[in-house]
Image: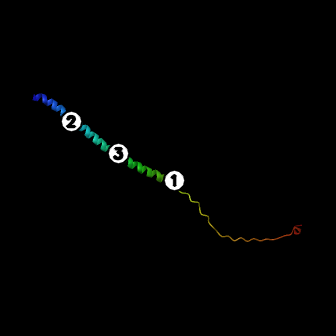
C-alpha cells in the first residue's frame, strides 16, 4: 500500500510546486511591469516638458519695438508773392 501512495503523493506535490512556480513567475512579471509603467509615465512627462520648452523657445513672444522719439527744430520761411510779381 505504501508503494502505491508515494507516486500519488509525488504527483500531488509536483502539481502544487508547478502552481507555486506559476504564481511566482506572475508576481515577478507584475513587478517588472509596474516598474516599466512608472518609467514610461516618467518618460512621457519629461518628453511633454521638453516639447513645451522647445515650442516656447522656438516661438518667442513678439513685442512691437518701441518708437524712438527725437526732437527736431523746423524753421519755415514763408514768402508771399503776388501774381503780378511773377511776370
Q: Distance between the residues labelled 3 and 1?
A: 32 Å
Question: Residue 64: x, y in percent?
Answer: 59, 60
Figure label count:
3
- The image's mark for residue 16 is 2
Q: In this picture, is 4 found above or below 46? A: above
Q: In which quarter of the image is residue 18?
A: top left
Decide which of 72, 63 is in the foreground and name it. 63
For image coordinates 18% across by 31% down, the residue present is 11
Quarter of the picture containing the C terminus is bottom right
Which of pointers 1 and 2 lies earlier in the amino acid sequence?
2
Q: Where is residue 49 in the image (x, y as percent from the top left)?
A: 44, 52
Q: Mark 3 highlights which residue?
A: 36
Residue nearer the viewer, 1 or 38: 1
Neighbourhood count class around disc 1 (C-alpha, 10 Å): few under 14, some 14–19, many 20 upward: few
- In whole angstroms, how far apart are the C-alphas of marks 3 and 2? 30 Å
> In this rendering, which labeled residue sits more in front, label 1 or label 2?
2
Please tell me which residue is depicted at 26% across the width and 39% down the height of the picture: 23
Amino acid at each position: 500500500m505504501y508503494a502505491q501512495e508515494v507516486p500519488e503523493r509525488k504527483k500531488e506535490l509536483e502539481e502544487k510546486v508547478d502552481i507555486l512556480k506559476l504564481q511566482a513567475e506572475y508576481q515577478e512579471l507584475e513587478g517588472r511591469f509596474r516598474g516599466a509603467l512608472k518609467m514610461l509615465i516618467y518618460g512621457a512627462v519629461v518628453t511633454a516638458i521638453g516639447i513645451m520648452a522647445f515650442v516656447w523657445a522656438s516661438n518667442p513672444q513678439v513685442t512691437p519695438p518701441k518708437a524712438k522719439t527725437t526732437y527736431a527744430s523746423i524753421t519755415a520761411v514763408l514768402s508771399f508773392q503776388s501774381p503780378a510779381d511773377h511776370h
